[in-house]
Amino acid sequence: MKTDSERLHNLRSPDKFWFKILGCISLWLLLNSFMGLWGEVKAGNDPLISDDIAPAELILELQPGNDIADINARYNTEIVDVLPGLNIYRLKLPANGSELANWLLLKVDPAVTFVDFNYIKRVPEARPWIVGFDASSNPVSYRGQYVQDLIRTREAHTLSKGKGVTVAVLDTGVSAGHPMLNARLAPQGYDFVDNDNNPDDPPNGFASGHGTHVAGLVLVAAPESRILPVRVLKNDGTGDLFTLLKGIKYAVDNGAQVINLSLGTYAQTDALNQILDYAWHNNVIMVAAAGNENTDAREKVQYPAGVSKVVSVSATDAGDRKAGFSNFGGYIDLSAPGVGLYSAYLNNEYIHWSGTSMAAPLVSGGLSLIRAKFPALTNSETIDRLKAGAAPLTRLNPRYQGQLGKGRLDLFTPLLN
Ligand SMILES: [Ca+2]
Ligand SMILES: [Ca+2]
């Protein structure tokens, strides 16, 4: 027989609470090992966290009807930033607060919809041992490169040039004065790294010029598109998840119809899914680079490319073979040339650059062409049209059956009625 006081003690016992917490830990470990994320690059205070994160920070969404002040009182947290119009907060933990311990506590707090670490995103090309610059090439015009014959820009541009469609480039910034770009930039570009309205692409970093190059490649495919430059990455090619969320929200709210994301991390988060849903429901298509580590989905998947509603892009070469560096897998939607692409760089220069980051903007440009010619199509119809018109890759890539998407980007076929 239990006494009333024992019953009361059991009711108040934290056992149930800790059971929930332990449940979270085992799920976390299972997911991590299952997804192959275990043992990845670690940072912050806690060895259980599987990718670089911003130290002493968390991102959460509050359940409607709750007050963030209550959360701050309960966990000693402070608001660093908030996503306007959404219930998503960037919180600072108390001094010496463990990211993992607080993540676990907030995970089971009924006032919280989701909680995520503030992961560090990066451009795939910021891993220098994989793909880098080739600045030694001849300064020929970007108009005369192999990719134009391959994806049939000239034929496509007789039917559409992307006029009236805004493509947001969320990246290291865009060099505004560049002759390839200056007439095509939307005036309301924004810099979420320095929080100013000048999203320039600053020099002297490992990834400097990345966003400029990517923006130029959107215009190779869709020369009359408008580029909305949104800076979410520093010139070393890194940026945090919350800054990316803000950038995507801003692009959606400022007229983007396509968003190019030549960046990623191997961590999957509710926060990213939430903002990608927001974009999708506002009729914005997102395109993401698959990453440059020559790995397939069984090993690891880079996000946002791994999110199903995002158009994920792997890279091929001039001979339509998978680029040696390109990630691949069943989640890929489409391939596009990504080896030795010539485009804008800092100081009004042009350079060759390789990577899935260079393949993705050609796909973004392809979607822009379709959106300009068939503006009534939904996101899914626009994407399906581009995929259905792709050139088959299977014969040349027998080892990658079903792993390079529907084929290699072709700009012309999807524009035919
Ligand atoms: Ca700036
Ligand atoms: Ca997809």
Image (spheres, grey):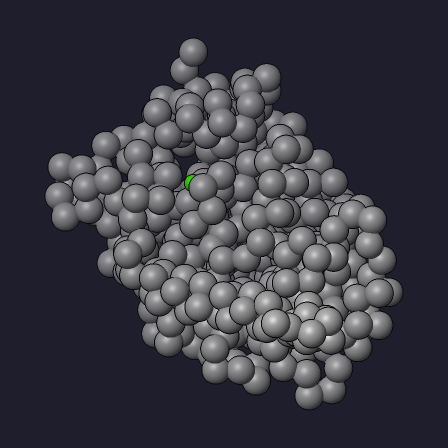
Q: Residue at x 34, y 74 (%)?
A: 129
Q: Tell me if I can see residue 305 in this picture.
A: yes
Note whether 279 is above or below 169 in the view shown.
above
Q: Residue furthest front?
A: 1
Q: Residue furthest top?
A: 417
Q: Nearest the camera: 262 or 112?
A: 112
Q: Residue at x 68, y 83 (%)?
A: 97
242 on left or right of 45:
right
Q: Nearest the camera: 222 or 269?
A: 269
71 on left or right of 351:
right
Q: Residue at x 75, y 82 (%)?
A: 94
Note whether 18 is above or below 153 in the view shown.
below
Residue 57 spot, x, y in % from top left: 68, 73
349 on left or right of 113:
left
Residue 33 spot, x, y in % from top left: 35, 67
384 on left or right of 176:
left
Q: Nearest the camera: 247 or 86?
A: 86
Could you tell me which quadrant the N terminus lies in?
bottom right
Q: Quadrant of residue 30?
A: bottom left
Residue 281 spot, x, y in % from top left: 63, 33
Note whether 84 is above or below 20 in the view shown.
above
Q: Residue at x 55, y 36 (%)?
A: 285
Count how many numbered circles sit on residues in the image: 0
Q: Tell me if I can see residue 326 in this picture.
A: no
Could you tell me which quadrant the C terminus lies in?
top left
